[in-house]
Image (cartoon, helix red, strand yellow):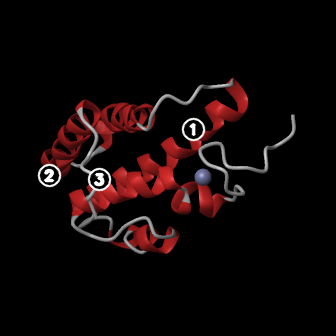
Amino acid sequence: MEKPEDCVFCTEKESVHHLLFDCVVARLIWKIVSFYFNRQLGSDLESIARLWISNKSHGTLNSVCSAVLWCIWKFRNSFVFNNAVWLSTNQLWWLILQSIQKWKTIFMQEDSEQVEGFCTLLRSVLKAPPPLDWH
Ligand SMILES: [Zn+2]
């Protein structure tokens, strides 16, 4: 199997950085994650990895960011290896929501309210697209 050179979501050349941070799909995901945590996240790996060393105070944020990275990669692979068909970014939001819900058992008890708040936000995103002027 030959690896496609173009991003599966847009017409840009694919790289890890493009797929996880620069792609229009990734930017939309990170915009909403940034909104929820009230912090600029997802511009590059450093914007999220710098918080990994303080996992006690950013446990939910780190887990959500890990879920986002994992799900973007899985979503991309479903196009490359399983001929998935693009419907909307809701497919990716659904994957992220499902992953976080599966991972709930590993979250710290004190993070459960924030995790549930993020899941509630995702459910509202799945019901209606965010306004175009979100930033
Ligand atoms: Zn792209």
Mark closer to the chain start, 3 or 1: 1
131 lies above or below 43? above
Q: Nearer the viewer, residue 5 or 121?
A: 5
Residue 15 screen position, x and y as percent: 69, 59
Which label number is shown at residue 65?
none
- In the image, is the residue at mark 2 within 8 Å of ligand 1 by its beta carbon? no
Would you say the residues marked 1 and 2 are in contact, meaning their CB atoms lie under 8 Å apart?
A: no
Q: What kind of element bears circle 1? A: helix
Q: Nearer the viewer, residue 86 or 45?
A: 86
Q: Amino acid at mark 1?
A: Lys
Q: What kind of element bears circle 3? A: loop
Q: Identify which residue is drawn at 27% across, 54% down.
A: 60
Residue 57: quadrant of the picture: bottom left
Mark 2 surroundings within 10 Å by alpha-carbon count, few (fewer than 14), some (14 through 19), many (20 or more):
few
Mark closer to the chain start, 1 or 2: 1
**Residue at image mark 1:** 74
Q: Which is in the foreground here, disc 3 or disc 1?
A: 3
Residue 35 screen position, x and y as percent: 24, 60
80 displayed left or right of 76: right
63 lies above or below 135? above
Q: Quadrant of the C terminus?
A: bottom left
* Real-space Cα separation, disc 1 to disc 2, in angstroms: 29 Å
Which label number is shown at residue 132?
3
**Residue at image mark 2:** 110
77 displayed left or right of 108: right
Mark 1 surroundings within 10 Å by alpha-carbon count, few (fewer than 14), some (14 through 19), many (20 or more):
some
